[in-house]
Image (cartoon, helix red, strand yellow):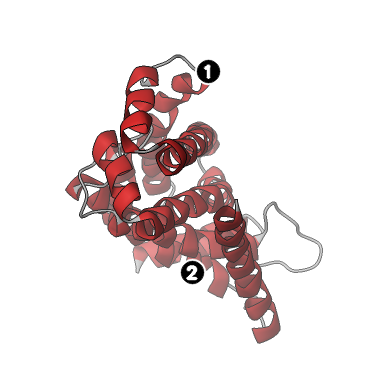
Amino acid sequence: MIEATGLKRILSKTGTRASGDTYWFPGRWLGGTSLVFAPLLLLAGVLLRIQFHFFFPQQLGAFRDHPALIGCSYSCFLAGNILMWPAMITLARLIGSSHPRWATWGGSLVIFGLFARTFHAGVDHLAFQLVRINGLDSATRTVAGSYGAFHAVSGLTVCILAGWTVLAIGAYVSGTLGLVRAVALALMSALMIGVLKGSSFTSVIATSGLCIALVPLGISVLRMEPEPGWKQFIGWFAFIALLVAAMFYIGQQG
């Protein structure tokens, strides 16, 4: 109850209740929808590859033996990661209504970290194509020989690992999230980052915590006055669904 009351106060203070003359980016509908669907996509991606060992040789082998399953897993995770940016801006906005420094540092660190994960997803895709074109042994040797090579994105790794904790503290002290859900959000700091990272029990805990923290928040944001009409809700749902479907379809064609 305290958390819900605090969220209503924050949304009212930031002008989220207003219609017409109050605008904020990315807006309540995109922000709220992203808060709901981005964590679910990340969790789906993690669960789809949980049966395989998380180290890269086993991930490459899993793609050779189960290309559709592994491709879907990594695509779900990438889609959730890309869709996370409106969610993080929305969360930072809510925190920033009373604690702008926590919002600025936490939100910025996490979003910079999202770029790192997107970069790694591109490397993952190339590695899987090496398996398809040159075979598993050749792809494994190539990845092993280039593992740890310098790239500018390496410096962003610490951002996403620290950013979730900073953002969780800000969410708690601002009243945006209660203690349990703030701790659940901070669990994302334990999610491994890097190239061809599979899933583990820790991965499931981290992404499940993200769902616990953000999905109810997204629903609360979407349900705040003025509530959307069915046309508006269906429109945003269709937009997100088409966006994710397009990513999967184009990825398969490529």
Residue situated in front as seen by the camera: 249 or 119: 249
Q: How many marks?
A: 2
The N terminus sits in image quarter:
bottom left
Decide if residue 76 is on the left or right side of residue 24.
left
* Circle 1 SS class: helix
Q: In the image, which disc is placed on residue 220? A: 2
Residue 62, percent from left and from top: 28, 48
Residue situated in front as seen by the camera: 180 or 162: 162
Decide if residue 51 is on the left or right side of residue 105.
left
Pointer 2: residues within 10 angstroms few (<14), some, or many (20+)?
some
Q: Tell me if residue 26 can be seen.
A: yes
Residue situated in front as seen by the camera: 167 or 95: 167
Q: Distance of mark 2 from mark 1, alpha carbons?
A: 38 Å
* Circle 2 SS class: helix
Decide if residue 64 is on the left or right side of residue 8.
left
* Quarter of the rendering containing residue 198: top left
Compared with 254, 144 (above or below) is above
- The residue under the point 44% across, 38% down is 124
Residue 206, percent from left and from top: 28, 48
Compared with 56, 22 (above or below) is below
Residue situated in front as seen by the camera: 56 or 7: 56
Q: Which residue is mark 1?
A: 152
Q: Earlier in the sequence, mark 2 or mark 1?
A: 1
Residue 9, percent from left and from top: 52, 61
Q: Inspect the image, locate mark 2, and give the three-letter code of the amino acid beneath it.
A: Ser
User: Farthest top residue?
Assistant: 150
